[in-house]
Amino acid sequence: MDFLYETILAVTWQQAVMWLIGFVLIFLAIKKDMEPTLLLPMGFGTLLVNIPGVDAILEEGAITTLYNAGIANELFPLMLFIGIGAMIDFGPLLANPKLMIFGAAAQFGIFFTLCLASMFFGDNEAASIAIIGAADGPTAISVSNKLNCDPGIRGAIMVAAYSYMALVPIIQPPVIKLLTTKKERLIRMDNQAKPVSQTTKILFPIVIFMISALVAPSAASLVFFLMFGNLIRECGVLNSLSDTAQKVLANLVTIFLGISISIQMTGDKFLQPTTLLVLGLGLFAFIFDTAGGVLLAKFLNLFLKKKINPMIGAAGISAFPMSGRIVHKMGLKEDPQNFLLMHSIGVNVSGQIASVVAGGMILSIFMG
Amino acid sequence: MNFNPERFVEMLPNMGFGMLGIFVVIGAIVVSTYVLNAIFSRNKQ
């Protein structure tokens, strides 16, 4: 009869703590609606991988096989990028291309965190932690894999990358308020959108791919899959494929991604002091990204006649479309007649492009 | 894990290169987008 309770007796305190973390992830996914497609499989997977002697995480186990098939070789993040690319409408950005500069500025947190993290970790680990600030899970996974980051902190990086994306409504508003005055938050912006031709929309993803891939070839595959997704959306002859990419493909890959990531959530790997440090540095990256975008807008306002509402700079992180919507809502809260959505979403999609480019820059610097 | 504060300063050039690289790429994309808009909106007219 020993077999009935020998597994229970083999549970370590680390595994029990991980169960709690698993339950928290499930709670956040279901009750708080925070990235449920990812946090739910991740939370449930965390329960599984912390059962003593479970075969799913052995060499030939189901989760290990899934991890090797989709994360170790970066297939899942790239497939997910097709879905994300198909979801993005670059229209607001094409109507006002200069907004892209805020997407670039909002990557400041990545590189500032790189400097901070390098005080505690080796180059590859510091770079992998810094990329949490891209607010872009697939890029974080891809960069940490390519840099062969220490598996001990990879789980924390993935958890931070995805959970902070969900925490954008909590993290960004206080930072924006701290860096802007009420007068600045009340600045109204012109909402007259310039028409964009369909040909421009079709050529845009191709041009972005060519430029990014030629300057940062390490990020070529990331940019390719993102822009391929957008091309099937805009080309007008693959509408059914575009729908599938946006819904079925993105959802399926996210589920597999969440379950596969949970293999990194075993108590012995995750419950380390370094995990807390990684989570803290990831938060720094998010905060400084937000600050980078806002401060650039404030700086430009010193020279511009037609002022920019500096809040839109904060949307330059790539948490799309959440960040753009948060800025819009903050604008409405200050002045119910101030509609910033078109600008903030334009900046937000530029953040998606810039974060992938930032990933490419990190890879170019550290892979040589 | 060690604490080496001097690494912060050592890493600053990488921060500079990275940010410069992003602005160069994004700048090139902005210029290309203006060109695309100029060519194809003119054709439309």
Image (cartoon, coloured by chain):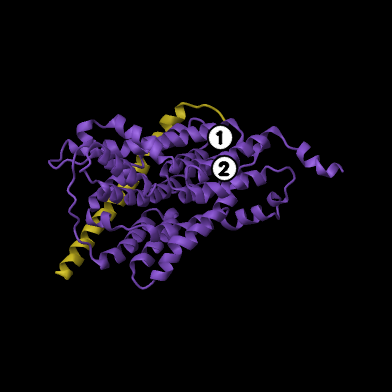
Chain colours: A purple, B yellow
On residue B25, the disc is none
Left or right: where does residue A64 sit relative to residue A27? Answer: right
State which quadrant residue A229 falls in: bottom left
Label 2 sits on what residue type? Gly
* Dots 2, 1 in contact, CB < 8 A: yes
| Residue A223 sits above or below residue A136 on the image | below
Q: Which residue is drawn at 15% across and 67% down?
A: B42
The chain holding disc 2 is: A
Q: Name the residue under label 2.
A: A155
Could you say which is closer to the camera, residue A106 or residue A239? A239
| Residue A118 sits above or below residue A131 on the image | above
The chain holding disc 1 is: A
Residue A339, percent across and down? 23, 46
Left or right: where does residue B27 sit relative to residue A143? Answer: left
Left or right: where does residue A60 sit relative to residue A179? Answer: right
How many C-alpha atoms fall within 10 Å of the one at disc 2: few (<14), some, or many (≥20)? many
How many C-alpha atoms fall within 10 Å of the one at disc 1: few (<14), some, or many (≥20)? many
Can residue A235 be seen? yes
Separation (CA) of disc 2 from disc 1: 9 Å
